[in-house]
Amino acid sequence: MILDDDHAGVYTFEYDHFEVVESCGHLSLRVQRNSGARGKVIIPYKTRDGTASGDVHFEHKEGELVFDDNQTEAFIEIGVIDTEQYERCDNFFIELGEPQWVKKMSDLNRIQERFHRRMEKKRAASITNLADSDDAMSTGLQGSFGAHLAPPGAEGGLTDRIKNRLSALMGGSGGSASSVGTDSNKDGKENQLMLTEQQAEIAELGKPRLGQYKKCQITIKESKEFQSIVDRMLKTANTRLMLGTSSWREQFSEALTVSAGDGDDDGEEDAGSTDGSIDKEAAEPSCREYVMHVISVPWKLMFATIPPTDYWGGWACFIVSIIMIGVLTALIGDLASQFGCWVGLKDAVTAITFVALGTSVPDTFASMVAAVQDKYADSSIGNVTGSNGVNVFLGIGIAWTMAAIVHFFRGTKFIVNPGTLAFSVTIFCIEAVICITLIVLRRQSWLGGGELGGPVKFKVFTAGIMVSLWVFYIGMSSLESYCIIDGF
C-alpha cells in the first residue's frame, strides 16, 4: 500500500521465516515496497549459510533487486537442491543490503515544474516583479544550490542554472542541510537561505530504507512421502544388524582376537594394492596393535561380561553398562587416592590431579573425536559441559541427597567441611571466564573464525593458553592446600 507518493519507499520481506520442501526445486521470495514508490532503487541481497550449505542444499546467490519508478514489489529466485539424503531439516538466510537511490532526469523535470508553479503564484500575489528583479530559489533536495531566475528571454536562465547545480547532486553527494530562498537584490547578487534542521530531517525521510524484515530464514524440510518411508523402514528394520552383538560367546571371542585397525594402516594397504581395494580380514595386525591388545585385554574381558545388546531389547546392556561405569569410577578414585598417599599428597591435591585426570581423560578423547568428525563445535564443547554437569548435579547431588536423608532419619546433622574449596572454586571461575572469552574471540576472522580449528598458529596459541590455565589452577590450588599461600 502506497502511503506517500513523494517517498522512495521502505523495503522488507513479507515474513521473517519461510518453510519449503526439499523437492520443490526453487523458492520465490517477494520483497515489498511500502510507504512510497518514487524513483528507481537498487537493493543488493545475498544468501548466507546456516545448517544448510550453499551450492549443496541451495544455490548460493548474490545479486541486486531493481525497483523501477512506481514498482511496489520484486522477487528473489533461489534454487533448492534435492540432495537425495534423508535430513530432517536445514536452514539458511537471505539478507537485504542498504537501498541505493538511482535518481533520474525525470526528477529534474519535476523540480523545474515546481519552480514554474512557484513563479506563477508569486506573480499572482504581486510579491515582486519577476521581469525587473532576479529571484533565487532552490528545492528541498539533499544538498544545496541557488537558482538565479532571469527575466524571460535572458540567457543563462532558470533551466540552465538548475541543470548546472543538479549535475553534481545527481551523483548522490551527501549533505544534511538543504536550502531554499528568494533573492530580490537588484544588484544581481545571489543569496542562499538554508533550511532549518527539522526541514532537513524531513527531506532525509524521503530516502529509501529497509523495513522490519531485512533478513529472513529459510527452512528446508524433507518431503513427507520420503520422511514417512524412512520412518517406516526404521521401525520395521532388523535392529540386530545395527547393534553390536547377540551372544556372550561372540563378545569374548572379539575380546581375545587381535584385529587390524582402521587407521593409517588401511591407507598404506590400499596404496600398495593393485586394484585399489583389499580385504580387511586378510590384513595382518601391526606390532603396535599387538602391544595395545596385550595392555587392553583385561579391560576387554571385563566389559565382555556386559549382557549382549539383543537381551531385553538392549535394556540389560544399558543398565549393566551404567553400573559398570559407576564401579570403575569408584575404583579409579580409590586407586588415585591410594597413589596420593604413597607419594605423600594431600587429598585435595590428589582430587584435582590424578582423580580428575582419571575421570576426565575419556571425556577429553571423546571431545577430540567429536571435534574431528563433526562439522560444528557443538558436540565437542557440549560434551565437556555435559560431563561436568553430570558430575556436579548427579555425582555430588545424589550422594549428598542420600547422606542427608540418612542423617535425617538418624537425627543427626549432615555437615561437609569445605576445606580449601572456596579458593579452588574462585580460581576455577576466573579461568572459566577467561576460557569463554577466548572462545568468543576465536569467532573473529583475525583469530581463526571459529571456536575450533583454523590455521595451525591459532590452534597452537589457543591450546597453549588452555594448558597454561590448567597448570596455573593446579599450582595455585596445591600451594594453598599446603599453606604456602594464604587462601580464604
Image (cartoon, rainbow, N blue to C red):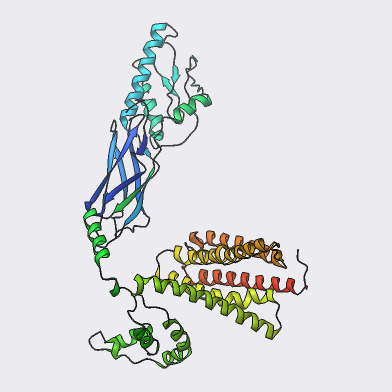
- Is 266 rendered above or below residue 40? below
Can the viewer see residue 242?
yes
Quarter that holds the N terminus: top left
Can the viewer see residue 151?
no
Residue 465 appears left or right of 161: right
Q: Nearer the viewer, residue 259 or 269?
A: 259
The spot of residue 304 in percent (x, y) is 41, 83
- Is 141 rendered above or below residue 275? above
Residue 78 appears left or right of 195: left
- Is 21 rendered above or below residue 272? above
Quarter that holds the C terminus: bottom right
Identity of the residue furthest to the front in this view: 410
Q: Which residue is drawn at 29% across and 53% down?
A: 221
Choose top left, top right, bottom left or bottom right for residue 126: top left
- Is 162 rendered above or below residue 485? above
Choose top left, top right, bottom left or bottom right for residue 107: top left
Residue 419 appears left or right of 10: right
Q: Nearer the viewer, residue 315 or 301?
A: 315
Residue 424 appears left or right of 104: right
Report how many numbered discs are placed on residues in the image: 0
The spot of residue 143 in percent (x, y) is 46, 31
The spot of residue 173 in percent (x, y) is 44, 37
Q: Residue at x 29, y 91 (%)?
A: 282
The spot of residue 67 in percent (x, y) is 30, 37
Q: Which of 156 and 381 is in front in this view?
A: 381
